[in-house]
Amino acid sequence: MLSLEPSSYLLLLIDFQTRLAPAIEGAAAAIDNARRLAEGAALLGATIVATEQNPEKLGLTAPELAGRASQTVSKMSFDASAAPGFPNHLLDGRPVIVTGFETHVCVLQTVLALLGEGIQVFVVADAVGSRRAENKAAALHRMERYGAEIVTTEMVLFEWLGSADHPHFRDISRLVK
């Protein structure tokens, strides 16, 4: 369960790129859910980091998410945390909420690396995507087997709030409608 203050979380937006998105099954929905999470994270004080895999070939971050992260890291490695310039200092004891493309490649390898470092990881099932549904399903199953929590956008947002008395309850409720 997401039980800490939202400001103690890192939201990771992995490779939501313009030239990659058309090949991803359900890309528009995944991007929209990542946008909702990013807006909620910004309201509630969570840190946001984005990555771009080989941006010269795959393009930049989708416009819906562009500019939402405090830092965007260009990378060639599939594991985002292994990329030069990745802010690993932000991971120190901080739970990570992971979204992105492709679930069975960059998302999977990043999640497995983070879990290997003892970091608590939440993978947002409706904010990740692969070219084929079976790759996404297999990757989610594998990540869960290794200890990642599989969650949804609304689960994260409402667990961050904890109560309808939260000052940002109406703002977050608008994000999910």
Image (spheres, rainbow, N blue to C red):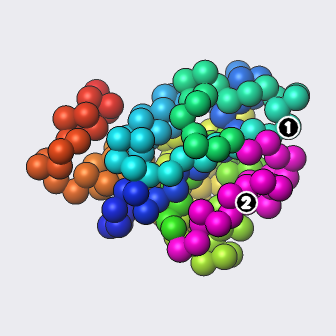
Q: Is residue 56 left or right of residue 97?
A: right
Q: Is residue 83 left or right of residue 96?
A: right
- Camera-side residue: 153 or 41? 41
Q: Tell me which residue sits at (32%, 31%) in the image.
A: 175
Return the x and y of residue 35 as percentages of the image width and height.
48, 32
What is the quadrant of residue 111 in the picture?
bottom right
Q: Tell me which residue sits at (30%, 55%) in the image.
A: 159
Q: Is residue 94 left or right of residue 156?
A: right
Which residue type carries mark 1? Answer: Asn
Q: Which mark is residue 81?
A: 2
Badge 2 marks a residue whose secondary structure is helix
Q: Tell me if residue 84 is in the magenta stretch.
A: yes
Q: Tell me which residue sits at (19%, 35%) in the image.
A: 170
Residue 89, compared with residue 71, is above or below; it is: below
Return the x and y of residue 2 as percentages of the image width and height.
36, 63
- Camera-side residue: 44 or 146? 44
Q: What span is in magenta?
A: 73-93
Q: Quadrant of the N terminus?
A: bottom left
Q: Which residue is denoted by mark 1 in the rendering?
A: 54
Q: Which mark is residue 126?
A: none
Of the residues under marks 1 and 2, which one precedes in the sequence?
1
- Camera-side residue: 16 or 85? 85
Which residue type carries mark 2? Answer: Ser
Instruction: For marks 1 and 2, give the CA distance.
Output: 15 Å
Badge 1 marks a residue whose secondary structure is loop
Q: Could you tell me if residue 28 is visible in this image?
A: no
